[in-house]
Amino acid sequence: MKPLRLHPDARAELDEAFTRYAAFDTDVASRWLSEYSALASDISANPGLGSPGEIQNARVRIFRSFPYSIHYIELSDHIVVMAIAHYRRRPGYWRRREGP
């Protein structure tokens, strides 16, 4: 297993999504966070299982129950989560972020 590190903007996206769902329904927010945690754990254990992403060496995993995806880059000693993207965001908006 490789540790996951969130890009600061990805951390903000995580917090924003949770806050949005929590304002709507705490049970939904809890389910969203559980699904994120399961995906994050799976990425940490099996980083190569993600689909090839929009930029070189990037991979993506899609939430099953929510309109989000996790975009990440595997490095030799850890994994950097570059974005937790909502489907309504402009595709590839995160590509300009300072990389790992």
Image: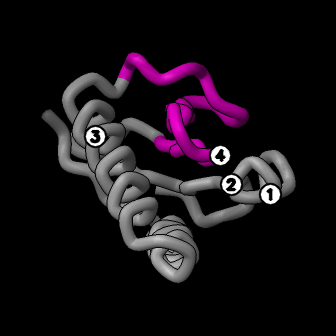
Residue labelled with disc 1: 89
Residue labelled with disc 3: 38
- First reached walking from the N terminus: tag 2 or tag 4: 4
Disc sitting over residue 67 in the figure: 4
Q: Do the residues under discs 4 and 3 have CB atoms within 8 angstroms?
A: no
Relative horizontal placement of residue 54, taking residue 1 as reference (left or right): right
Residue 3 place in picture, x, y as percent = 19, 48
Q: Residue at x 27, y 51 (%)?
A: 4
The image quarter in which residue 55 lies: top right
Q: Is residue 28 above or below residue 39?
A: below
Q: Do the residues under discs 2 and 4 have CB atoms within 8 angstroms?
A: yes
Q: Is residue 43 magenta?
A: no
Q: Foreground: 33 or 7?
A: 33
Q: Residue at x 52, y 70 (%)?
A: 21
By what rule are the colours in the image chosen? Answer: one colour
Q: Residue at x 53, y 82 (%)?
A: 23
Where is the N terminus found, in terms of image quarters?
A: top left
Disc 2 to disc 1, how far (Cα)?
6 Å
Please name the amino acid that badge 4 sits on.
Pro
- Label 3 neighbour load within 10 Å: few <14, some 14-19, many 20+: few
The image quarter in which residue 84 lies: bottom right
Q: Do the residues under discs 4 and 1 have CB atoms within 8 angstroms?
A: no
Bounds of the magenta segment = 48-72
Q: Is residue 70 magenta?
A: yes
Residue 81 place in picture, x, y as percent = 44, 52
Q: Foreground: 52 or 17?
A: 17
Disc sitting over residue 86 in the figure: 2
Q: Foreground: 81 or 55?
A: 81
Q: Is residue 49 above or below residue 3?
A: above
